[in-house]
């Protein structure tokens, strides 16, 4: 089970060495920064855990849908909408005089992400619209809503015209998990979500129905598992997780709503979900790996002068090699001589 | 026979992994002879044909053509020497016309090809309109197109794989006339079948295959069906005699003027279907697949919903609007014709495949799966229905068709249904498993279950059913008493000569 991801990581490293060398960068140093530096100080390791929280949370939600062949590609949009909805409270109550501010923000974020994903479910079940396209387009719309709010009604009046909201009051911020770091309790949310996903997908009938719908849709129909329900559930849970992750981002490391909330977690989580084999336990491992690459990538851009895009290429290579090794482990290539008809 | 054999196999063997598919096969086929290759499913018939047609290469042994040793690396090598093959499942494009389909394989101008198709049709009784669209053709006509396409390559040997399995009796007659004309023309024909009566009527030589070896070489005209069967399965034919059915009881399933528009261009519209099924009886629906069988089965199972709730009644309740799970709760069970991907999930274990429809048998506790109950159920099913498998953890996709069918049938029977729909119960199942499956169905009937069987196999329907309907072109014939009708009468309904 671990053959494919490990092999993929090795191949990715080899390909990156060639690529970095071709760029004229010190390839060995770049790889060292990318994969080892994050472990060399407690602070950088805590940053890995900080990155891991949203990736893990979103990927667990997405994987549930993916197992049922429901392809939510626009978790980024649900993440943004979750962040928006959560931000509404501190924006309108900047002094923090709202009871249970933080739980309400998380709830708003969860609700926002879920509803935003369910738009795609409604269009798919009613009109047969592909959820791949709908969620992707909704993600682009979410970015524009974010821009509108930050440039207009929600702009901080004392923010020197920067497109960002006021800084959130203290009671709108997630508690820090380890003193001296930025790692907050959203990591706990993500781990709880992993336990939930594991129990549901491996031991609950609902998860069995989702898996059946993904592996053999006609068997699901034969058994009488409602196909629309699988779509609602798959998209809804993905949106829920992404929404909570979005809320945690503004109530965590950002402390306000700003444009940089669109950091690509929603897209990276797709890679995380697949490299983790869509398995709840595997995803814990893959989210950690991708987080290491994020943090290592930051230091590699500084220490080895890698362009920022190189880190994204590294992630892309990882997914590519994973899908390749996964396929080649399951199937055998047979070269068929052309048979004239 | 003085002249050398057209095709001669000596000591041909082929092995796939641990399975010895063909072992030391000797075979001689002469021009002007119709040679039967007889055997159960899995006896090695298909492998042997693949070796002769160049789809696969033998591990050892020799193939001689007109006395010359030959090696076929690919089917075109065999075609070049004059070997043609008509496969059991047709390879025609439905959206193209006959002549367009032919021109994909045969060089030549369409107008010339159309003329040749008409000429061959006249000569050998294979009439078909060259410009007709294939999706409009009947099964018999499609088979004629396949045969014509082979004949255009001027073969000296024609291989036919189970050619009659898809034909109604009237078309079988016509096919035989064609084959006799080809034989008189000097062609050699390899006729693969497990239907003993047909072989006795048509063929002058029969090679019997069992377990990958030739176990007999006989003149089928000099043997009766029973002794041929014994050669084929290597033991006495299992006795299928069964107690006569009790008079049927209460009504369990009823279709009232069931109609349904087709879902796609290649589907079938169902129209005005009436049917009654009572406790303790087996009713059969005969007919060639593609005449609405799939649509009807999906409507009865709930996989597609009827237009009016009252069009379908199960246990006296109107269920046309209900889904499969709700219908199962009323005591309905269903064995679909596709086992992998519909009746079972190939990637899942047998235990998890039990869960598919048997989850109501205390396999869930607050929605969580009770693995021990699931496994116990699966183990019981494996034992009671003689499913050959390592155990409940075996993947469904790794099992043979017959074993998986026994498992699915067992799972559905263990739900103790009051009414059961079984679609194509023995498709692709070997004769031993098929006999076991039929016996199970008769046992169920005796215990008071109402069973509806949809099948293409006429013998099977006559063996099981007390009443028969024929589904043709989306319409169902009136009920015919099995004891009073004949295969010929059923055949007339199958081709629409009677409605």
Image (cartoon, rainbow, N blue to C red):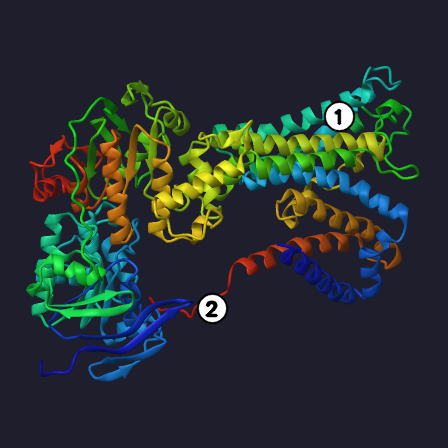
Secondary structure beneath label 2: loop
The chain that hosts pointer 2 is A
Asked if residue A174 lies left or right of residue B305, the reply is: right
Q: Are labels 1 and 2 assigned to the same chain?
A: yes
Give the residue displayed 84% in from the left and 57% down from the top.
Answer: A33
Q: Secondary structure at mark 1?
A: helix
The number of numbered badges drawn on the structure is 2
Asked whether, in this view, residue B270 is left or right of residue A201, the answer is: left
Q: Which residue is mark 1?
A: A106
Q: Residue at x 76, y 55 (%)?
A: A310
Kindly indicate the quadrant of the structure image that contains residue A87.
top right
Residue A79 place in picture, x, y as percent: 71, 33
Above or below: residue A107 compared with residue B193? above
Residue drawn at (18%, 46%), measured in percent from left and top? B240
Residue linked to disc 2:
A335
* Residue B53 horizontal side relative to residue B461, left or right: right
In the displayed structure, B474 sits above or below B91; it is above
Tell which subunit mark 1 falls on. A
């Amino acid at each position: 089970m671990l053959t494919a991801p490990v092999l993929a990581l090795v191949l990715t490293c080899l390909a990156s060495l060639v690529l970095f060398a071709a760029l004229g960068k010190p390839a060995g140093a770049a790889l060292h920064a990318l994969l080892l530096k994050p472990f060399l100080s407690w602070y950088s390791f805590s940053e890995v855990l900080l990155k891991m929280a949203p990736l893990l949370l979103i990927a667990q939600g997405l994987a549930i849908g993916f197992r049922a062949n429901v392809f939510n590609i626009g978790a980024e949009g649900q993440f943004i909408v979750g962040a928006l909805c959560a931000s509404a409270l501190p924006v309108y109550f900047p002094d923090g005089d709202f009871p249970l501010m933080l739980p309400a923000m998380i709830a708003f974020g969860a609700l926002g992400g879920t509803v935003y994903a369910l738009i795609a479910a409604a269009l798919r079940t009613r009109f047969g619209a592909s959820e791949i396209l709908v969620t992707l387009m909704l993600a682009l719309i979410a970015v524009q809503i974010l821009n509108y709010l930050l440039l207009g009604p929600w702009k901080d009046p004392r923010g020197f015209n920067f497109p960002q909201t006021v800084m959130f009051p203290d009671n709108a911020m997630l508690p820090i998990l380890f003193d001296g770091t930025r790692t907050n309790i959203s990591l706990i949310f993500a781990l709880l979500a992993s336990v939930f996903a594991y129990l549901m997908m491996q031991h609950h009938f609902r998860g069995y129905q989702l898996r059946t719908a993904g592996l053999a849709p006609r068997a699901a129909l034969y058994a009488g598992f409602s196909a629309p329900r699988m779509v609602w559930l798959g998209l809804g849970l993905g949106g829920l997780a992404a929404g909570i992750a979005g809320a945690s981002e503004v109530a965590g490391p950002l402390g306000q709503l700003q444009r940089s909330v669109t950091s690509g977690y929603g897209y990276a989580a797709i890679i995380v979900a697949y490299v983790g084999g869509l398995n709840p336990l595997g995803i814990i491992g893959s989210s950690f790996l991708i987080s290491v690459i994020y943090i290592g990538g930051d230091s590699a851009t500084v220490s080895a002068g890698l362009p920022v895009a190189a880190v994204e290429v590294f992630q892309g290579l990882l997914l590519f090699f994973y899908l390749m090794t996964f396929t080649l482990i399951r199937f055998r290539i047979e070269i068929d001589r052309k048979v004239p008809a | 026979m003085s002249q050398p054999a057209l095709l001669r196999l000596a000591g041909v063997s082929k092995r796939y992994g641990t399975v010895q598919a063909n072992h030391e096969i000797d075979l001689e086929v002469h021009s002007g002879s119709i040679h039967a290759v007889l055997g159960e499913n899995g006896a090695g018939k298909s492998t042997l044909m693949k070796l002769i047609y160049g789809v696969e290469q033998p591990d050892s042994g020799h193939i001689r053509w007109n006395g010359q040793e030959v090696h076929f690396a690919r089917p075109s090598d065999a075609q070049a020497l004059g070997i043609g093959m008509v496969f059991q499942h047709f390879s025609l494009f439905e959206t193209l016309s006959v002549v367009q389909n032919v021109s994909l394989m045969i060089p030549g101008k369409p107008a010339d090809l159309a003329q040749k198709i008409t000429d061959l049709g006249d000569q050998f009784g294979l009439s078909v309109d060259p410009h007709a669209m294939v999706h409009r053709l009947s099964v018999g006509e499609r088979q004629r197109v396949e045969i014509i396409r082979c004949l255009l390559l001027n073969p000296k040997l024609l291989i036919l794989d189970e050619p009659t399995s898809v034909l109604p009796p009237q078309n079988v007659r016509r096919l035989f006339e064609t084959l006799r004309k080809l034989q008189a023309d000097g062609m050699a024909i390899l006729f693969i079948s497990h239907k003993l009566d047909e072989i006795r009527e048509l063929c002058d030589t029969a090679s019997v295959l069992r377990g990958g070896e030739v176990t007999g070489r006989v003149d089928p005209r000099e043997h009766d069906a029973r002794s041929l069967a014994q050669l084929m399965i290597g033991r006495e034919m299992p006795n299928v005699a069964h107690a006569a059915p009790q008079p049927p009881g209460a009504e369990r399933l009823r279709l009232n003027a069931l109609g349904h528009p087709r879902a796609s261009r290649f589907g079938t519209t169902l129209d005005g279907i009436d049917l009654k099924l009572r406790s303790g009886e087996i009713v059969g629906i005969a007919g060639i697949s593609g005449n609405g069988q799939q649509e009807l089965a999906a409507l009865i199972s709930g996989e597609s919903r009827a237009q009016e709730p009252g069009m379908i009644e199960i246990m006296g309740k109107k269920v046309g609007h209900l889904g499969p799970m709700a219908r199962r709760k009323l005591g309905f069970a269903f064995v679909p014709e596709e086992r992998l991907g519909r009746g079972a999930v190939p990637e899942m274990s047998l235990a998890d495949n039990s869960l598919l429809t048997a989850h109501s048998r205390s396999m869930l506790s607050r929605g969580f799966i009770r693995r021990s109950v699931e496994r116990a159920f699966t183990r019981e099913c494996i034992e009671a229905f003689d499913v050959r498998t390592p155990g409940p953890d075996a993947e469904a996709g790794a099992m043979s068709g017959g074993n998986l069918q026994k498992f699915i049938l067992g799972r559905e029977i263990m739900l103790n249904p009051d009414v059961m729909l079984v679609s194509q119960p023995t498709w692709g199942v070997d004769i031993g498993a098929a006999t076991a499956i039929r016996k199970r169905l008769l046992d169920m009937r005796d215990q008071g279950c109402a069973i509806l069987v949809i099948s293409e196999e006429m013998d099977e329907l006559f063996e099981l059913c007390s009443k028969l309907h024929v589904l043709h072109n989306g319409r169902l014939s009136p009920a015919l008493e099995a004891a009073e009708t004949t295969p010929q009468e059923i055949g007339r309904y199958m081709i629409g000569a009677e409605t």
